[in-house]
Amino acid sequence: MSVGQRVGSDHQLARLLQIGVVLEEVVEARSHHHYRAMDAELDAELEALLADAAEESADHREQLEALIAELDAESVPFDEIEALVEAQYGNTKPEDFDGVLYDQLCNEETAYKFYDDLIAAVEGSDATYSVDRDRLLDTLRGIREEEAEGVEEVTDVMERRA
Amino acid sequence: MNTADQYLKAIYLVQETEDGPASTGAVADALDVSPASANEMIGKLQDRDLAEHEKYKGVSLTEEGIVRAREALSNYCIIERFLANVLEVEEFRAEARSLEAVIDDTVAERLDTIIDRSSECPDCFDAETDACRYLDVEGNQEQEQENPAD
């Protein structure tokens, strides 16, 4: 059991980046689901928010996949995660618009926390990775920044609707 | 999962296995830390009313400590199941141990939306094999569940 946050090897780093990819895929797949479910309701603001979230997650996923490829590891295909989201969605879907917004807020906050912890764990390690450390940290910090903006964006919408 | 939660989980599992208070040495072994480090953290848990330490007997969790430990164990189960079933990692136990410090509770909750966990969790966790008893720890194949989750 490991006490303390450190990323000590390429293998561990690749695994954590894979988890990042899966989190992004979950966001993307759930956003698509919410979007489709709301189709008839015509709420333009929420539709735009979900479409942006899905697009941003796809972009983050591509950035993470580029790093994973350099570590000589494999990513996790989106269709596999989409199928898992599909299979479990009935148990976890939001009940209404407020629920959709809350779910989206959880997505953004969770992603922010994940990248924040991962950055700290990379910074806390002396390990040398196959991928350039500066590029790795720049990529992760860039994604973390966008997740922070995402939290702000969803919070603004929630407050406006309150 | 933060360090305190890792300790709570370890104490909980040692208590379950030994059916009584957990010795500091057993907790230190479970976490691969020195007995001095374990003692220090057990003291902190005691200060926070999460554990009680009795000389020559060992440490026991309070009710609040048990609640926290079970939450931590559930999150650990999510990480193991996610690694085994989604990423198809053969050494999912070892990897879960190496990753748990970096995986926050909120992240585990998100990962939980794509795995099929038994409603018994975390009672179906077997401390001896360090895995959910519904996961086949040899072949990594799902065993038939008596009471599967919906």
Image (cartoon, coloured by chain):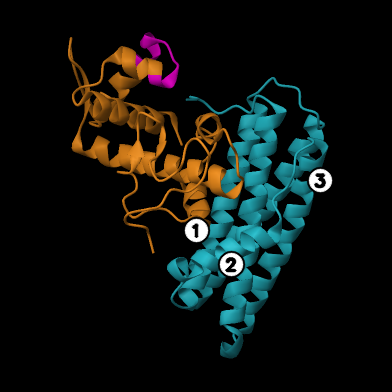
CA gap, disc 1 and disc 3: 26 Å
- Magenta residues, start to end: B30-40
Name the foreground residue: B106 vs B149. Answer: B149
Name the foreground residue: B116 vs A129. Answer: B116
Q: Colour of chain A?
A: cyan
Considering the numbered disc 1 on the image, is that residue within a helix, a strand or a loop? helix
CA gap, disc 2 and disc 1: 10 Å
Q: Is residue A74 left or right of residue A156?
A: right
Q: Chain of mark 2?
A: A
Quadrant of res A43: bottom right
Quadrant of res A136: top right
Considering the numbered disc 3 on the image, is that residue within a helix, a strand or a loop? helix
Do discs 2 and 3 share a chain?
Answer: yes
Rendered position, A14 above or below B118: above
2 and 1 marks in contact (CB < 8 Å) = yes
Q: Main secondary structure of the magenta part?
A: helix
Q: Chain of mark 3?
A: A
Q: Is residue B24 left or right of residue B54?
A: right
Q: Colour of chain B?
A: orange
Rendered position, A8 above or below A105: above
Rendered position, B77 above or below B5: below
Question: Residue at 37% across / 58% down in the picture?
Answer: B148
Disc 1 residue type? Thr
Mark number displayed over residue B113: 1
Q: Dot 2 corresponds to which residue?
A: A30
CA gap, disc 2 and disc 3: 23 Å
Do discs 2 and 1 share a chain?
Answer: no
List x then y, in percent, for residue B144.
40, 52
Q: Dot 3 corresponds to which residue?
A: A66
Mark number displayed over residue B43: none
Q: Is residue B45 magenta?
A: no
Disc 2 residue type? Arg
